[in-house]
Image (cartoon, rainbow, N blue to C red):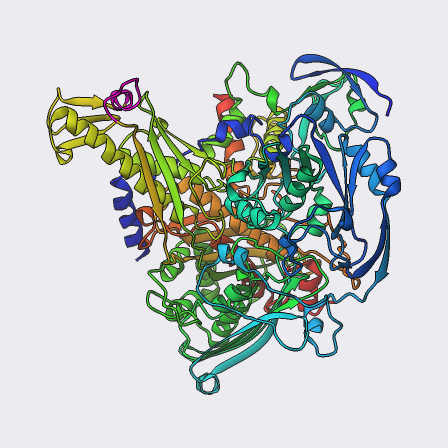
Amino acid sequence: MPKQVISLTVNGRSYEVAVEPRWTLLEMVREELRLSGSKEGCGTGDCGACSMIVRSPQDERGRLITSCLMLATQVDGCAVTTIEGLATNGQLHPVQQAFIDTGGVQCGFCTPGMIMAAKSLLDRNPSPTLEEVREGLAGNLCRCTGYAKIYEAVIQAAQTKKA
Amino acid sequence: MAQETKLREEEMHGEYRNVGKPVKRIEGAAKVTGETVYADDMQLSRMLHAKVLGAPYAHARIKSIDANAAREHPGVEAVFAPADLPAYKKNFSNRRGMIFPDEEVLFYGQPVAVVLASDPHVAEEALALIKVEYEVLPPVVDPIAAMGEGSPLVRSPLGDVDRSEERGHVTVGVEQEEAEGKPSNIASQMNFRRGDIEAGFAEADVVIEHTWRSAVVHQSYIEPHSTVADYDASGELSVWTSTQAPFYIRDELAQTLGLPENKIRVTATEVGGGFGGKIYLQELMVAALAMAVRRPVKYIMSRKEDMLAATPAPQAVIDLKTGMTRDGKLTALKSRVVYDSGAFPGAPMLPGCLLVGGYYKCENLDIQGYEVLTNKVSVGALRAPGAHNVTFAIESHMDMMARELGLDPIEVRLKNAVEEGDPLPSGQPYPRIGLKQCLEAIAESEVWARRSKEQGARARDGQRGDPARPTSASGRAGRGLLRGTGLAVGGWLGGLQPASAIVCLNSDGTINVTVGSADITGTNTSFAQIAAEVLNVPLEMVNVTTGDTRTAPYAGMSAGSKTTYTVGRAVKLAAEDARQQMLEIAAKRFEAAPEELEMADGVVRLNGSDEKTLTFQRLGRLSTNFAAPFPAVVGRGAITTRKMAPGFTAQAAEVEVDPETGEVTLLGFAVAQDAGFAINPLSVEGQMQGGASQGLGIALSEEMIYDSEGRLLNGNLLDYRMPTTRDLPPIEAIIVEVPSEEGPYGARIVGEPSIVAGAAAVGNAIADAIGVHLTDAPFTPERVLRAMGKL
């Protein structure tokens, strides 16, 4: 299938990638850029394991998206943040650290998407209530934790970020 | 009593520096950064992707398959239909003994052909080019209809059925009767009888009889089944797969493919959720394809394929009749337990029959179990397989009888609860267990305390006995929302398998632990705690590896909640062995006896001496350097056990029911569970909350819906509704600790019991709110409205 070249940044680094029109953003990131942290749990946008933050040139702030439902060609010119882009200089992002500290990580498969959703929530609302956390993570399924420790993680991360 | 238990816990945990403390996952950083490698993250040179064609009928005969057009599709490397598969030892009686059907398709979505290509899109395209001609046969979908004399047969007769996989989940030394004689859809059956059932009912003041139905549910791990296999020129087969059971897969592959076990290397890649559903399934196909094409092959199930053709958990139909005296004594229990096994045997009839009569002392029992075949996908384990189905029945009954007799639901359960020495329905006596302690603990939960407060207020206001309580606390006053609280107990017996471990001292003084068990629940972190405890060092000095089946010492499957109980014990023994070897080296250096030495914080010292000390690093060098005077320190631990360490739980639910829409909102949920000894309380709580959430899905929303032709109608995560954050308030976890006899530090089985009681607890809470018990789970708005007589 003929390919089309797109330009984008992923985690602050610029790329030009030749993509097939049928490739999803998730597929391009995992298979072409070999950033395999984002996961495919359903391929239909229901589980959120593939969540990324995409900012188009006209956006002020990025949007949380399910990358299995977005075509690679749609992110031409955009800035994409994946789970690999959160830690800086070997220092975990407060959300990542909080997931470890509270036991919010179990099997780890939903974790990259869940953390992206939590980061996106805290970017919009730095001090969410429990109810706001439950609302903000509603697009991300976790089968291991029953969410209790994930709620704790997000609230702890909010406090750490403020401190 | 609960207070005493708590005090004892503090005493127990106070003695230790590592075990009994909440510890973060040792692999946590890799998981939160996305660096952990799951099977789908593997990339091998020349790797091909497999895409599978599923049958569009639940029962059919394959008349012909024409794959020529698919083979000619540009980019396709190979196509395999049943006739093209390499030779292997087939067994059509067990799902795992076959790749494709010989000619009889037994369930909708059953794999019938596979395409291999470098580009997965190309393989997918080629599937549409395979022409299969079917003769459609009548499907049998309902298990009760399937049991009828006149029912068409689900399949050609079974041969020898291998039940080894089920024994990994529950190991109790009881056999079921395999079907014999006239062909029928009943694959196996069993019966437990005790006392005089009719006399028991005659003695009772209340006798009730109901039928309880629960749905087919899916494990719904977020990572679908995923496998990569490769076969090299020296005849070695490597399989990287998301499994709970690497050694089991190795053994099965060896038998089926005719390879020696030492030529097979199965690596359990990080498991993105298993819950009993990832034991052994597609690995045979992927391995056989890799051997046939002599290239690495990757197969990742789509979510739809996983829902159509993996191994979900069975529906069951439980007829139950129970009797109780006025003062709350259970006098008789009669049950017919029917599990729908799908197209192959493997349903958890045995644990179901044991548990339906296994929670309470009851002198008169008559339990009859049936494992029935239907033209649906074959079932597998889901966290305490079969337990939630029967628990829904018996725990609803206990609630109904207590209500009718005006007894307290906790008191009536305490009065009858089994304890050490009481027999299971099979006659086997329970070892030490903590069911009563769980009931005492749940009484102290916030959820139950709120109920007690409300009941007190109700009694004062003269409303006692009125089950429907209008609520205003939700802020939605005026709609007549109804609130209720309910509880239920549950338990699981657990699996038993031998286990082993190796503990080595490195030259820098750090410690390596190697095990063969897949870490699906944080067990490697617990093993680090155990080894660090024995060697009296900080946790950071220990690392733990799950090896593959060629490098690791043997472990059973990580199923049946047995990993900490069995492998943990082996790790403790291996660490003790390593400790002894280190003490002996030091004793020789100090010319003292090992008993005169003490070991703490990475230093061995002669009692009371400041000079006669050897660091672990020095010991490491003395046993690894060139011309070192001592052999390497390699501790070995190996165990077997035939003693169960059953785990019990008591759970309380608080719900709000909208009488106009039938919608049930969960306001609070509490789980008390006996962990024996919580080696890592953070992990134990996580298991309790996670298992409970799966029980809540079974209660409220999860159901695989099949039409009359056996086709799954909701094979995706939008229409199959597992709980989301919107559905679940934070779940309260209360750890109870009644030590097991043989587990490390008293630990007992933990992973599974938490799923067991959710449906019953929520059902009882709904009954408390609306005045009537729902007999079919999940409790959808439609079923709630029907129960209320509004539909």
Q: Quadrant of the N terminus of chain B?
A: bottom left
Question: Looking at this rendering, what residue extends furthest in the top direction?
Answer: A14
Whole-percent x, y for residue B471 in the image? 58, 57
Whole-percent x, y for residue B224 in the image? 65, 42
Relative to A2, B279 lies left or right: left
Whole-percent x, y for residue B554 in the image? 43, 44
Q: Say whether residue B512 is magenta.
A: no
In the displayed structure, B672 sits above or below A106; it is below
| Quarter of the figure with residue B303 | top right
Relative to B772, B544 lies left or right: left
Q: Residue at x 39, y 67 (%)?
A: B417
Q: Pick the residue in front: B425 or B169.
A: B169
Q: Is residue A92 visible?
A: yes
Relative to B562, B393 lies left or right: right
Q: Disc count in the image?
A: 0
- Magenta stretch: give its range: B617-630
Q: Residue at x 32, y 21 (%)?
A: B507
Q: Pick the residue in front: B170 or B287.
A: B287
Q: Residue at x 48, y 86 (%)?
A: B198
| Quarter of the figure with residue B242 | top right
Q: Residue at x 46, y 67 (%)?
A: B174
Q: Pick the residue in front: B284 or A163.
A: B284
In the displayed structure, B4 sits above or below B505; it is below
Q: Quadrant of the C terminus of chain B?
A: bottom right
In the displayed structure, B73 sits above or below B467; it is above
Whole-percent x, y for residue B396 in the image? 53, 68
Q: Is residue B370 visible?
A: no
Q: Say whether residue B627 is magenta.
A: yes
